[in-house]
Amino acid sequence: MQPTEISDHLKIDLVRKIAEGGMGIVHEAVQNGAGGFEKSIAVKLIREEFSQIRDFRSNFFGEAQLVADLIHTNIVQTYHLGEINGQYFITMELVRGINLSEFINIHRHLNKQIPVDLAVFIASRISRGLSYAHRKRDKRGRELH
């Protein structure tokens, strides 16, 4: 895939597609800055047809705002919500490696069980992130729901 600049003010080049779903596509990208600055990030690009739906945009903006202040080891960090040519995107922390679904599928394919201690470790890290998110309050001290 050819690198594509998606924003004049952020200077983000899309490198490759990581995943695709019904509402959008997640790309690995490089954010470029002054003095040769480069940072690998993920870009969640919402499909144009969804970007045109007011209720979807409202929910998307709300979700981005909600997760923007979630700073936790077990939660992917959100950096920026943007728009280019009527299409909305979120830039996020890029986590390299396989996702949990791929990990489980590999074990199924190999007909191997995931070791119990590893499964408990993974579940504990997911639980830590969820617990943090559910206890998090906004700047006024209100629950985020």
Image: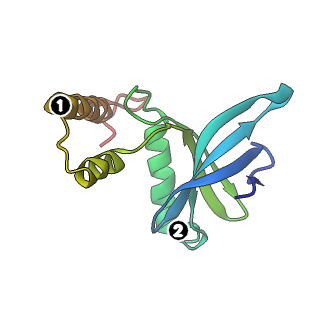
CA separation in Å, label 1 and label 2 = 41 Å
Name the quadrant containing residue 74.
top left
Dots 1 and 2: beta carbons under 8 Å? no
- SS assignment at label 2: helix
Res 120 label: 1
**Residue pushed farthest bottom?**
49
Tell me residue 127's x, y (percent). Answer: 23, 33
> Residue at the location (61% across, 39% down)?
41
Eye-nearest disc, 1 or 2: 1
Q: Callout 1: 10 Å neighbours few (<14), some, many (20+)? A: few
Question: Which residue appears at 50% of the width and 37% of the height?
Answer: 96
Q: Report the residue marked by disc 2.
A: 54
The x and y percentages for residue 63 are 44, 49
Query: Residue 54 at x, y = what percent?
Result: 52, 68
Residue at left 64%, top 36%? Answer: 40
Which amino acid, mark 1?
Answer: Val
Please state which amino acid type lies under the numbered disc 2.
Answer: Arg
Q: Which quarter shows the C terminus?
A: top left
Across and down, in percent, residue 95 comes to 49, 37
Quadrant of the rendering where the N terminus is positioned: bottom right
Could you tell whether 7 is left or right of 106 in the image?
Answer: right
Q: Residues within 10 Å of mark 2 (few under 14, many from 20)?
A: few
Up-down relation of residue 46 to residue 129 (above or below): below
First reached walking from the N terminus: tag 1 or tag 2: 2
Q: Nearer the viewer, residue 113 or 56?
A: 113
Does residue 46 lie above or below 18 as drawn? below
The tag on residue 79 is none
Asked if residue 133 lies left or right of residue 114, the reply is right
In the image: residue 64, left or right of residue 85: left
Up/down of 9 relative to 20, above or below: above
Element carrying mark 1:
helix
